[in-house]
Image (spheres, rainbow, N blue to C red):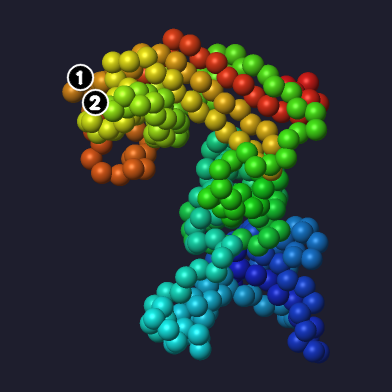
Amino acid sequence: MHAHLGDRLVVESPATGVVRRDGEIIGLHHEDGTPPYDVRWSDTDDVTLVFPGPDAHIEHLEAAAEAEAQADDAPSATDTVGENAATPGTSATPAPGRPDPGDVGRRVAEERRRRGLSREETARRARISPQYLTYLEEQPSDPSTATLLALAAALDTTAASLRGGGVDRPPGQGHALLHPRLNDLDQKECRRLLSTHGVGRVAVTAPDGRPAVVPVNYEVVDDAIVFRTRPGSVPAAAAGNEVAFEVDHVDEAMSQGWSVLAVGPATTVTDPDAVQDLARRAHTEPWAGGTRDTWVSIRPTRLTGKRITPADQSARR
């Protein structure tokens, strides 16, 4: 018997073939995939060390994914009728609510990094092996509901968020807290929340003279907020003016979050060596795409922030 992380262990009755129990293999003890295995059981969410007997078999993740893909590719009766009919052999549109391969792992990795957690610590909190967490973050996979709930609890988020639920809705639709508390953030905490990179909004006067607020991918380099754009664009209009730059995070499920506001003069980075250094240190390409090699730097002269939390949680901070 050989298994991979993410495979399913199925235990059947030797007499009737009826499934008695099944679970997700979340830990291997031998490199060749032989038993024993750490298994998270689907009926109890418990994790146990299992030495499979003759009544057990492995359902391999790759085989299940291939069968599912073949089922998706097969044309149905409705697929062959009408101008929008799918051509046999082409990929069908994923069912609503199902994550695209790899999306869950990318969201898990991003939430983990946002909270400053190592893979080992996250795996310990979720009661899965670090190797399995590495697999989830780096390979296309669709973890079980139990594992998804465990990861959500470990990362202080929700399973729906890890699956991408609500990505097309603006944040802030949750219910207000029963006893909210709004706290001012000191400059040290504001700088920490700004972190080193992310997506923020810059408020500028556009070239047509109208006010505008636009999102940009930003970095923090030597206490300056920097982003790249193209000449003549709305974000480029920040250069030569005092601007406001805002970053926030909303926990929709908990109706809480924070915001940081930086105000200061913006300038265009013109030194070739400085431009080259910024490009080298950038974590991501601008999401807007295209050629965007004009760097704008904001030196905050004022840095303020707010955090809203439940009153009892605020008292413990």
Residue 166 pos. (x, y %) = 58, 50
Residue marked by disc 2: 275
The answer to whether 228 appears left or right of 44 in the picture is left
Mark 2 residue type? Val
For the view shown, which residue lies furthest in the front direction? 209
- In the structure shown, which secondary structural element does the residue marked by tag 2 occupy? helix
Q: Alpha-carbon distance for marks 2 and 1? A: 6 Å
In this rendering, the answer to whether 98 lies above or below 216 is below
Mark 1 residue type? Asp
Q: Within the image, what quadrant is residue 34 found in?
A: bottom right
In this rendering, the answer to whether 58 lies above or below 141 is below
| In front of the other: 133 or 151 | 151
Residue drawn at (75%, 64%), measured in percent from left and top? 41
Residue drawn at (70%, 75%), measured in percent from left and top? 10
* Residue 236, numbered label: none
Residue drawn at (39%, 18%), measured in percent from left and top? 243
Res 133 visible = no
In this rendering, the answer to whether 190 lies above or below 42 is above
Residue 313 pos. (x, y %) = 77, 27
Q: Are marks 2 and 1 in contact (CB under 8 Å)?
A: yes
For the view shown, which residue lies furthest in the top direction? 301
The answer to whether 160 appears left or right of 90 in the picture is right
Q: Within the image, what quadrant is residue 163 found in?
A: bottom right
Question: Around disc 2, counting alpha carbons within 10 Å, would you say few (fewer than 14), some (14 to 19), or many (20 or more)?
Answer: some
Residue drawn at (62%, 75%), measured in percent from left and top? 59
| In front of the other: 261 or 70 | 261
Res 243 visible = yes
* Residue 271, numbered label: 1
Residue 270 pos. (x, y %) = 20, 20
Question: Around disc 1, counting alpha carbons within 10 Å, would you say few (fewer than 14), some (14 to 19), or many (20 or more)?
Answer: few
Residue 62 pos. (x, y %) = 52, 72
